[in-house]
Amino acid sequence: MNTFDEIIGNESVKLHLKNSIKMQKTSHAYIFEGEKGMGKRFMADSFAKALQCEAGEENPCNKCSSCIAADSQNHPDIIYVKPTNKTGFGVDDIREQINTDIFTKPYKYRYKIYIVEEGDKMTEQAQNALLKTLEEPPQYGIIMILTENLDKLLSTIISRCVHIALKPLKQSEVKEYLEKNQEMNSSSAHIYAALSRGNIGKARMYIEEQEFEEIRLMAINAIEAVINKDDLAILEVANTISLNKEKSDMMIEIFLTWLRDLLIVKELKEENNIIHKDKLKTLLKQGEGIAYNRICALISRLIEIQEIMKVHVNYQLAIETLLFEC
Ligand SMILES: [Zn+2]
């Protein structure tokens, strides 16, 4: 069930949204911003459900016909706006699914709520079309735009919306969630929580990824190859990463956490603070073979590659250069 109480973390956001319901000071437009897996949809769903609940309280009653319909994802007055083609929202999507539809009164409930998923995929024309509705929405209309990246939205859109930024959770919160909900032992939960950087969705995605161990082994071997200056092995690693674009994000995260652990065991000797505790022996051995400066150089270049990958250019060359140069 989608209720604020089920959401872990982001307490100030929940409080803000609940208060707006209590004080009857809701806006006609919201932007929920946060990276993939951070719970934008869950937060928007919970808010929409609470807004439509017939009890009219800050927390939904979970019993009325509106709450039941919202939980079944089949609410006549909570509308999910989706692009009709894979590349994103065109102007016609927005005109047909929002601009025209919003002027038909709600079917049964207090508001007519539109949740625009992947709002960052709206073309400029689509956003301009939406702007017309945002300028003069009907009194019952509420539009919630979900986006991973605020920069993809026009400033004219942003200025008309209440901006809700979802924050990453504490590592300990993710760890606790994994132990409770995924029945995971403490040391595995520790690794996944660290890799997820406060993003439960990402942690769950990594857990579902069966090849985690395989990728970790590859990271370990890659560092080994860098230490031994084994060019062939380095090329193979660069190739594997670039052939697995969908997993590259996870690979780089594993690389980074591994290098971070190397620094800790080598320089700080604080073995309790490492992520890959189960591989302490390998870390200690590798730490002896690689200089502090090389580890730091690898880390900063990997962070650069993460940035390059965000804009989807060919990054195989970047990976090769990285592994050979450091
Ligand atoms: Zn209700």
Image: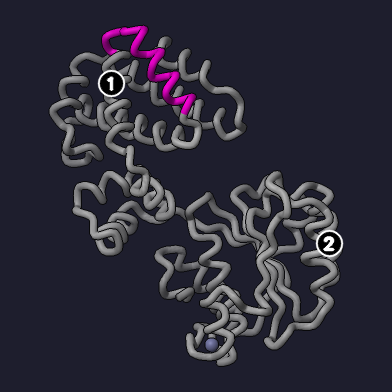
Magenta extent: 227-243
Q: Tell me the distance, in whole angstroms, between the alpha carbons under discs 1 and 2.
A: 53 Å
Amino acid carrying label 1: it is Asn
Quarter location, residue 163: bottom right
The answer to whether the beta carbon of the residue marked 1 is less than 8 Å from any atom of ligand 1 is: no
Residue 127 counted in the magenta span: no
User: Which disc number belongs to residue 221?
Assistant: 1
Relative to 214, say whether 142 is above or below: below
- The reply, left or right, for residue 132 in relation to residue 83 is right
Mark sitting earlier along the chain (1/2): 2
105 over 296 or under it: above or below? below
The N terminus: image quadrant: bottom left
Tell me which residue sits at (39%, 25%) in the image.
299
Relative placement, left or right, of 142 versus 264 is right
- Please state the horizontal and vertical placement of residue 131, each as a whole percent of the image: 82, 60
Q: Residue at x 59, y 62 (%)?
A: 164
Residue 300 horizontal/vertical position (percent):
44, 25
Instruction: Please say whether residue 240 is one of the residues in the magenta stretch.
Output: yes
Residue plotted at (56% across, 70% down)? 45
The image quadrant of residue 249 is top left
Q: Are marks 1 and 2 in contact (CB under 8 Å)?
A: no
Q: Which mark is residue 181?
A: none
Would you say the magenta stretch is mainly helix, strand or loop?
helix
Q: Answer with the quadrant where ligand 1 appears in the image.
A: bottom right
Q: Residues within 10 Å of mark 1 (few under 14, many from 20)?
A: some
Kindly tell me whether residue 29 is visible in this rendering. yes
List x then y, in percent, for residue 213.
Answer: 27, 36
**Local secondary structure at mark 1:** helix
Q: Residue furthest left?
A: 281
Question: Badge 2 is on which residue?
Answer: 95
Q: Give percent across and percent down for residue 50.
A: 56, 80
